[in-house]
Image: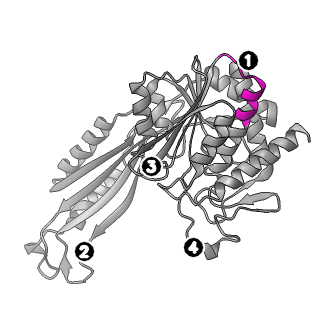
Amino acid sequence: MSTQTSIYSDTLQLAISLMEKPSITPGDAGCIPLIIERLNQVGFQSELLRFGEVDNLWAKYQTQGPLLVFLGHTDVVPPGEHTHWVSPPFEPTIRDGYLYGRGAVDMKGNIAAMIVAVERFVTAYPSFQGSIAFLLTSDEEGPAINGTQKVVEELVRRNEQITWCIVGEPSSLNHVGDIIRNGRRGSLSADLIIHGVQGHVAYPHLAKNPIHLFTPFLNELVNTTWDNGNEFFPPTQLQVVHIEAGTGTYNVIPEKLIAKFNFRYSPEVTVELLQQRVIEMLSRHQLDFEIHWQYSAAPFLTTPNQLLKQVTASIFEVTQTTPELSTGGGTSDGRFIAPLGAEVIELGLCNRTIHQTNECVAVADLAKLTAIYGIILEKLFL
């Protein structure tokens, strides 16, 4: 059996084994025990760290630095209506060169590629200078409270020093390795209540309509330029995601309006500055308001350095293309690792079908990603 065929088979079979387990957040459904069994066979020391109802894995090979961490999650989003799938979402099926099933791309296919690449590397080079770890959680698609964040807190208590981190999120767009995410924007959300005075629509002078009062503020909010971004980040963006008011009748002026909005922000602004500007705007429009903030992620950036250099070279070696660097998209668990001083990048499969019905991955891409991860290991440690 050729090496390429062997990678194809090993990664595919492991991906299928993981995808068969219905690990809907926060359930792991047995994925981590399966992974522990495999990693221990090649010399890893594995710990199951459970916080609340969330299972997390910290598995490490060797103890000397530098340390490369593969970061990922075993949980998946619900599949939705099974009747909309061409095959059952937790019965992985290969059709026309694609592997179908929930988690194929986000992110059990990526985990399988990581594990097979690492198994091959440590078997071939058992005494390389450095160490490798896996940090896997079953709480990435959910609140992300008892997952990677809690594990990182434990690693800090142990004074664990992480040099590099590869997040296996599906970063690619059209072909494997065409995009590396070397940072992410921050995320700040707001729950806003505008208070008015309820009344009869025929007597508006006796009431105070919060919808009418809110409209000028909303217009300014969505048309404000918060910053201009920088060479690595696009400008800060705001999206209003929910507005609710009224009793459902035609003859009652509502007493309050509820709105929700979210900032995806660049490092050119801070959470405090965004909050201050919004509150100043609300006050300027003389609104009677309550606002509650939810801060979920700080922006982070890995500038071109050793990790990016070797990842870029590895991708080129396999695909003959040079990846684009991007800080777009949502948030990832890389936001918990970056504050430790580690170089963090995201590299994974194509993301076109993530969270969709009939999620799927090209089978050939599983082998391609495994090969890229394997070359990265060689370039970093040999």
Residue corresponding to mark 3: 54
Residue corresponding to mark 2: 246
Start and end of the magenta stretch? 117-129
Q: Are marks 4 and 2 in contact (CB under 8 Å)?
A: no
Q: Amino acid at mark 1?
A: Leu
Which of label 1 and label 4 is nearer to you?
1
Residue corresponding to mark 1: 382
Which of label 3 and label 1 is nearer to you?
3
* Mark 2 and mark 3: Cα distance apart in space: 39 Å
Residue occupying image coordinates x 80% and y 37%? 319
Q: Are marks 1 and 4 in contact (CB under 8 Å)?
A: no
**Visible residue check, residue 330:** yes
**Which secondary structure lies at badge 4?**
loop
**Which secondary structure lies at badge 1?**
loop
Work out whether mark 1 precedes mark 4 in sequence or the reverse, and give the earlier one. 4
Does residue 198 appear to the left or right of 350 in the view shown? left
Does residue 253 appear to the left or right of 39 in the view shown? left
Residue occupying image coordinates x 32% and y 37%? 271
Work out whether mark 3 precedes mark 1 in sequence or the reverse, and give the earlier one. 3
Which of label 2 and label 3 is nearer to you?
3
Q: Residue furthest left?
A: 206
Q: Quadrant of residue 164?
A: top right
Residue 372 pos. (x, y %): 74, 34
Determine if the magenta segment contains residue 323: no
